[in-house]
């Protein structure tokens, strides 16, 4: 499977699953174990608002490579179809761009880079 053959939306579809799994796994590794607590913590990382905010902070820091920024725009600008009622269109599109980066990295086997993004996201979120 060649990553460049997929639309930004397809990359985001995979990136959403990758991010959710990585966050949930990390939370369990850190000793969080109760369902309600896990769900509340997961939302801090996996919701559209959280992902959009994480992207904004990382972008401001110059964290992403030029290629990752291109992937972000590819995902953000792709036709999103319907947007969940729980978020506005701009936030949803920004989170989709973030997910597209993750989907691309997963398809390219860039596990270490995904972990680097997750580590930085955990630092940012814990600081808030």
Image (cartoon, rainbow, N blue to C red):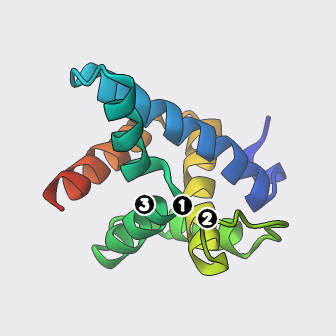
At a point 71% along the width and 47% down the height, the residue shown is 13
Q: Using the rendered view, name the quadrant where residue 97 is placed.
A: bottom right
Q: Which mark is residue 56?
A: none
Number of on-image labels: 3
At a point 50% along the width and 54% down the height, the residue shown is 47
Marked residue nearer the N-terminal end (2 or 1): 1
Q: Is residue 128 above or below residue 121?
A: below
**Whole-Å distance between the Cαs marked 3 and 1?**
6 Å
In the picture, measured across the screen, residue 22 lies left or right of residue 118, that is: right
Residue linked to disc 3: 50
Residue linked to disc 1: 48
In the picture, measured across the screen, residue 113 lies left or right of residue 5, that is: left
- Residue 37 on image: x %, y %: 31, 33
Numbered disc 2: secondary structure: loop
- Residue 118 on image: x %, y %: 35, 44
At a point 42% along the width and 60% down the height, the residue shown is 50
Residue linked to disc 2: 86
């Amino acid at each position: 499977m060649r990553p460049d053959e997929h639309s930004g939306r397809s990359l985001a579809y995979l990136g959403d699953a990758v991010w959710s799994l990585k966050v949930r796994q990390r939370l369990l590794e850190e000793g969080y174990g109760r369902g309600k607590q896990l769900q509340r913590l997961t939302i801090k990382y996996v919701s559209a608002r959280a992902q959009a905010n994480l992207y904004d902070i990382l972008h401001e820091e110059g964290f992403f490579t030029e290629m990752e920024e291109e992937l972000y725009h590819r995902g953000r600008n792709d036709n999103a179809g319907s947007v969940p009622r729980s978020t506005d269109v701009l936030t949803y599109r920004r989170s989709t761009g973030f997910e597209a980066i993750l989907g691309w990295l997963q398809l390219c086997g860039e596990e270490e880079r995904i972990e680097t993004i997750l580590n930085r996201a955990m630092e940012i979120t814990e600081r808030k």
